[in-house]
């Protein structure tokens, strides 16, 4: 089952796709957001599908939006793959590295990614994204994290490395928060349908392979991340957690940074595929 939000920017509507058929979720909810997830939304969708209460929908040609509306927070884990830490010039961390993206960085999975004026070190990062479905504070164990995860989707944690590492001594969130810097989607897949530690994830730039790894190589697995985060902050329904990226980014020096007109493809096994074109913003 895949939860989707389709339609023009700011006017997306909720849908669900199962066995190749797309159904309109309007009889059940006006939106896929934190409130919907917290109210057992995924279970209610399954029940409605089972009772045949949702009408089939024709959605050909509709834009794909981010699968969760208005995320309340985008929390990120840095250097969560040992090989990526090494290509960044760092030793693997002993504890999760945490930083934030502004929630308004989130756009649809196929929307244009804007290169800020003067930015010369814009990078791609394929990541497994966790979507929180229940409020989580001080979870007792990693296993308890299972109960608060609504599902999973794909994130491209676009980064401007000069802003992140060089400007004013480097501040990670500074390089992560430009507009359009978090394509998300295409779909939210329920947590009980995904093994988050057995997913192949890949990225491509202009059709050429860049990253190719597995979430099995995470230093801190998903359940541990959610458990630890719940002791530093309160996780709310609709929060998105980007769980880190594997090796193969431009920061490694092996590949050029993104240029105007480049095309990225980002995919995770079982969760789908994104495609973005870059476009330079020019000052007037």
Image (cartoon, grey):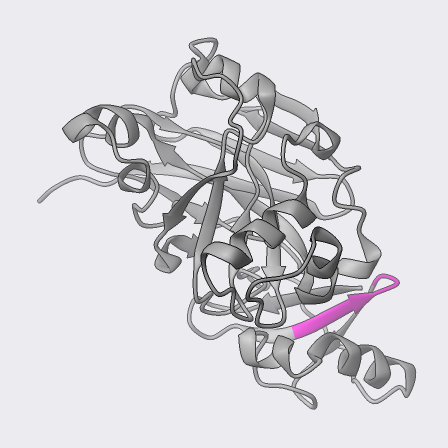
**Residue 189, above or below 44:** above
The one nearer the camera, 137 or 6, is: 137
Q: Quadrant of residue 146?
A: bottom right
The residues colored magenta run 15-20
Residue 99, magenta (yes or no): no
Position of residue 16 measured from the top left corner of the image (x, y, whole percent): 73, 71
260 left or right of 203?
Answer: left
Secondary structure, magenta segment, majority class: strand
In the depicted view, which residue is nearer to us: 27 or 103?
A: 103
Report the residue at 49% width, 17% height from top: 91
Q: Tell me: residue 10, above or below residue 19.
A: below
In percent of the image, x 28 and y 26: which residue is there? 165
Q: Could one spot residue 107 in this view of the protein?
A: no
Extreme-top residue of the structure: 254
Tell which of 144 and 103 is nearer to you.
144
Can residue 199 be seen here? yes
- Quarter-wise, where is residue 17 in the image? bottom right
236 relative position to 161: left or right:
right
Residue 161 in picture, x, y percent from top left: 32, 27
């Amino acid at each position: 089952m895949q939860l989707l939000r389709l339609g023009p920017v700011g006017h997306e509507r909720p849908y669900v796709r199962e066995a190749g058929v797309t159904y309109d979720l309007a009889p059940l909810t006006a939106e896929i957001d934190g409130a919907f997830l917290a109210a057992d939304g995924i279970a209610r969708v399954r029940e409605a599908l089972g009772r045949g209460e949702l009408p089939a929908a024709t959605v050909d040609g509709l834009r794909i939006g981010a699968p969760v509306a208005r995320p309340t927070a985008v929390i990120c884990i840095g250097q969560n793959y040992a090989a990526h830490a090494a290509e960044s010039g760092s030793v693997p961390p002993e504890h999760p590295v945490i930083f934030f993206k502004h929630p308004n960085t989130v756009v649809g999975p196929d929307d244009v990614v804007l290169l800020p004026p003067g930015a010369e070190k814009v990078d791609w990062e394929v990541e497994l994204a966790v979507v929180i479905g229940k409020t989580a504070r001080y979870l007792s164990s990693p296993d308890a994290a299972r109960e608060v995860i609504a599902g999973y989707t794909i994130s491209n944690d676009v980064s401007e490395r000069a802003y992140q590492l060089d400007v004013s001594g480097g501040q990670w969130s500074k390089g992560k928060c430009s507009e359009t810097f978090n394509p998300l989607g295409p779909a939210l897949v329920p947590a009980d349908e995904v093994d988050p530690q057995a997913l192949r994830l890949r990225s491509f730039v202009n059709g050429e392979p860049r990253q190719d790894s597995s979430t099995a190589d995470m230093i801190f697995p998903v359940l541990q991340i959610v458990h630890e985060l719940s002791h530093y902050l309160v996780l709310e329904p609709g929060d998105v957690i980007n769980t880190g990226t594997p090796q193969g980014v431009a920061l490694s020096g092996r590949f050029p940074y993104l240029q105007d007109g480049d095309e990225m493809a980002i995919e995770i096994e079982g969760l789908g595929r994104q495609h973005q074109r870059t476009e330079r913003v020019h000052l007037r």
